[in-house]
Image (tube, rainbow, N blue to C red):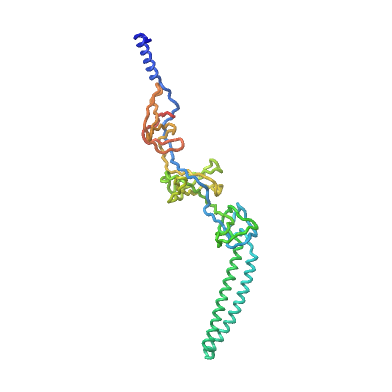
Amino acid sequence: MRPPSGTAALLAAVAVGFVACSSEAPEEIGATAKVERSRIERRIVATGTIEPEKEVEVRPRISGIVEAVHVEAGDRVAAGEPLIEVERELTQYRLREAQAQLDEARAELRFAGAARQRADKLHRGGTMDEQAYDEVAARFERAQAAAARAEASERLLQVELRYATVEAPIDGKILDVDVEEGSAVASVASVTGGTPLLSIAADEVLHLEGLVDENEIARVAIGQEARLRTEAFGDRVFRGRVRDVAPIGERQQSVTYFEVEVAIEDEDAKLLRPRMSGDADIIAEVVEDALVIPETALVYDGEDVFVEHVVSRDPPETERVPIEIGIVDDDRVEVKKGLEEGWEVELR
């Protein structure tokens, strides 16, 4: 049953009045922040590991059994210091044999030399025919060659005997030792390239080898300041500087990265150790007097960026203002256009 026309009109009026009151009800303004001037940095993260300036993997020059290991991981050594001894008894016996063969060859050479001198006199005097003279000369030359061959063999074994003592190629710290007494090792001349004995690093100078995403690499340049952090030292910061940027990237899981080397220039760099994980915040750009707002003030609409500018608090009123942003530094954002210092913006 339809209500009388007067009642319908009254209900419609009440409904309109209710809607009007609801649309005019003021909305409260949430948390806000002021647009301030501050220093802001564009930081690009290179993630990688701490590496020594030089690292050498030591392999033996002769094959044999390890007789003694003089060092262990963590030891500091000087170039030329003995590290490992490979058995030398067999080489010593071979050397004695080679020395005996050399003595024999030299004796034969002396005899052939004396015969050659006699033959020279006889040949000049016309009392020795050409064939006999040629035989004496050939014997002398063969003796010369045999003596040279025996001398070379003896010297080779002397060198091998010296190689039985594996010496440190550089000053540095032993990173790890891969063999122990009794281990069989193959020389670097073998088809396998030799058995790794140990690794030694010149760790007086360290650097971080890190990877930077291809989207950021264009902003990285040699000489830029960097701040390094490692998992081992938590929030402790070590000073560094970019010293090299790889000219070609490497593909990892469909993403291209570029390797960046950051030299560690901090006076406490000696606390760091090779292979530590670390990150370097590379300071790619600095604006000393930027307009800055919290990142939580940003409102996105597609590719456009806005903020809610607080026009009035009583009554509450905001206006959506388009802005242009620059550097993003953690939870702060540089505003290049659209806002003025001292303005208040609502946070999301």
Residue appearing at x 38%, y 17% in the figure: 19
* Residue 126 in picture, x, y percent from top left: 52, 91
Residue 202, compared with residue 292, is above or below; it is below
Comparing 12 with 39, the one in front is 12
The quarter of the picture where residue 28 lies is top left
- Residue in the image at 52% along x and 45% along y: 278
- The residue most toward the front is 1
How many numbered discs?
0
**Residue occupying the point 59% across, 65% down:** 160
The N terminus is located in which quarter?
A: top left
- On screen, residue 341 versus residue 81, left or right, reads left
Give the position of the C terminus as an image quadrant. top left
Residue 144 x, y percent position in the rendering: 55, 78
Instruction: Specify whether 92 is left or right of 33.
Output: right
Q: In the figure, is residue 212 to the left or right of 128?
A: left
Viewer-side residue, 334 vs 48: 48
Q: Position of residue 266 (x, y in %)?
A: 51, 47
- Compared to 347, does 111 lie above or below? below
Q: Horizontal and vertical percent for residue 168?
A: 58, 58
Residue 216 sits in which quadrant? Answer: top left
82 in relation to 34, above or below: below
- Please, is residue 72 above or below residue 236 in the view? below
